[in-house]
Image (spheres, rainbow, N blue to C red):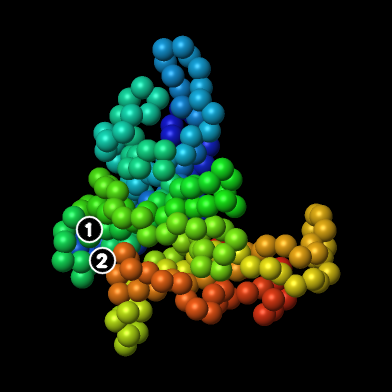
Amino acid sequence: AHEFDGLAACMWGGGGSLYDAEESLFRIWYHAHGREYHPDDGAYSLRTSNTGYAYSSDGVNFVKPHLGRHKFGGNRENNIVLPGICCCPVLMDPTQPDPDKRYATFIVGESGATPADGWTKELWYSADGIDWKRGPEVYRGSIETNDFIDMRTVIIDEWDSDPNRRYKVYGQSYAVELNRSLPSGYKGELKRRKVRSVGLWYGPDLEHLIPHPGNPILHPNDGVEHEIHFC
């Protein structure tokens, strides 16, 4: 398929879903893979990554609108909202006083030669969830540290009495696993290695998040799991 999501359309690795009560719509942003066709020479690119957008009135049947924002395969008849980018979950913030920041997401980038060397996380904003603008960088660090998280869930916690903990971001972090026997079918030696756990950041807003001092807050060593993958 020549579509930008012809190879995969998934929530893993990016995107998010929410219900927009004002519009009475379920809205999703999803991670898409495809192979772009170049009509000039008839060649295909290697796998591409983009963020797509769709909506639904019932949460079952979704519409992928032709937004006309970004070119793919020689035309703009697609629903791409972030070209070449896979975003983290999208938050719609009804308390945001700036209408241009009503929607927010995080974009992950690499700051080193390899993923272990360094990562950056930027906050991006949108007035409508379609057209996005880059905001401030909120993190720069290494995957090897306890303050790193691969953001998966972003919430406004109205039940927390501490205003400095109102915004919460949960995500995948990496910690050292204890030596233990391998599960059936597990490939390779386990020994001591980095495994997926769950960490938490919080703050009074999304631009001033700090890591929870007790990260990771969920660790596979606390149970029988070998890893806690995403959240």
Tell me the kind of residue under disc 1: Lys
Marking on residue 220: none
Q: Element under label 2?
A: loop
Q: Earlier in the sequence, mark 2 or mark 1?
A: 2
Relative placement, left or right, of 91 versus 183 is left
Q: Residue at 31% of width from left, 33% of height from top?
A: 70
Q: Residue at 48% of width from left, 34% of height from top?
A: 48
Tag 2–tag 1 contact (CB < 8 Å): yes
Q: Count the marks: how many?
A: 2
Vertical order, 79 against 205 (above or below): above
The percent coordinates of residue 73 (x first, y second) are 40, 25
Residue placed most toward the observer, 112 or 20 = 112
Distance Cα–Cα, label 2 vs label 1: 8 Å
Relative placement, left or right, of 86 versus 21 is right
Q: Residue at 51% of width from left, 63% of height from top?
A: 149
The percent coordinates of residue 97 (x first, y second) are 16, 66
State which mark lies toward you, 2 or 1. Answer: 1
Query: On the image, which quarter does residue 98 sit in?
Result: bottom left
Can residue 76 be seen in this snapshot? yes
Vertical order, 45 against 97 (above or below): above
Marking on residue 101: 1
Q: Residue furthest top?
A: 41
Marking on residue 93: 2
Residue neighbourhood size for the residue with mark 1, other residues' Cα within 10 Å, grouped as few (<14), some (14–19), many (≥20): many
Tell me the kind of residue under disc 2: Asp
